[in-house]
Image (spheres, grey):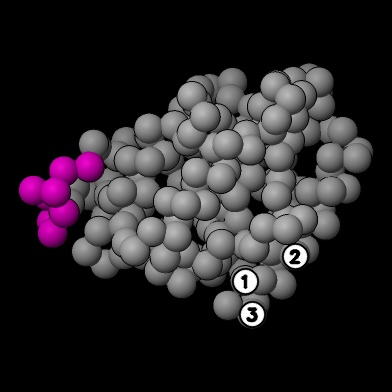
Amino acid sequence: MNIVTIVGSLRKESFNLKLAKTMEERYQGKFNMKMLDIRNLPYFDQDEENDPPQAVKEFKQEIANADGVIIITPEYNWSIPGVLKNALDWASRVDKVFIGKPVMALGATPGMLGTVRAQMHLREILAAPGLQAKILPPGGNEILINFVNQKIDEQDRLVDEGTLSFLDSKVEVFIDFVKTV
């Protein structure tokens, strides 16, 4: 199973990037995970959507070729970061590579609410006509990692056993979801 991961933060010490690296290592026997870099995507420009820059073509091709997508987002001003929205805007145009694609959303924050507002907004965006992703249904599948700064070790990996156990169970749900979509 081939999964691509989009981290919505560009910060080198991003907790969400640390979470992605933890997942990449922890689940390497369950699926192949490739992190997509959104740093080099230009601002969405409708004048270029029919012949986008090479970075956009490669980004969209990786999503198209994947069996599923994991989006790991921080929360900025009660929403997703602009760089993540920009990436989703590119993916929503012309060939619309998210349509029908299984997606799992999660996020981590040092705060108490674990990116709940960002993920709610992300779900709305992913359901929009240009994206129409198959989002892992809510109702127990939300992965909202709070106080993450207290759950990361010196090697920048998530180590809190309760959080990892919960994450393990939701990754299993996502794997089954990908297989059925």
Nearest the eye: 49 or 37: 49
Q: Position of residue 16 (x, y in %)?
A: 61, 33
- In the picture of the structure, the residue carrying the numbered disc 3 is 180
Left or right: 108 in relation to 47: right
- Between marks 3 and 2, how big is the CA–CA gap? 11 Å
> What secondary structure is marked by label 3?
helix
Three-letter code, disc 3: Thr
The numbered mark at residue 178 is 1
Earlier-in-chain disc, 3 versus 2? 2
Kindly identify the residue that appears in the image at 8 percent across and 48 percent down. Answer: 47
Mark 3 and mark 2 in contact? Answer it, CB < 8 Å.
no
Left or right: 72 in relation to 108: left
Left or right: 14 in relation to 172: left
> What secondary structure is marked by label 2?
helix
Quarter of the image with the N terminus in it:
bottom right
Q: Residues within 10 Å of mark 3 (few under 14, many from 20)?
A: few
Residues shaded magenta: 44-51
The quarter of the displayed image where residue 44 is located: top left
> What secondary structure is marked by label 1?
helix
Q: Residues within 10 Å of mark 1 (few under 14, many from 20)?
A: many
- In the picture of the structure, the residue carrying the numbered disc 2 is 173
Mark 3 and mark 1 in contact? Answer it, CB < 8 Å.
yes
Q: Based on the picture, tell me whether residue 49 belongs to the magenta stretch.
A: yes
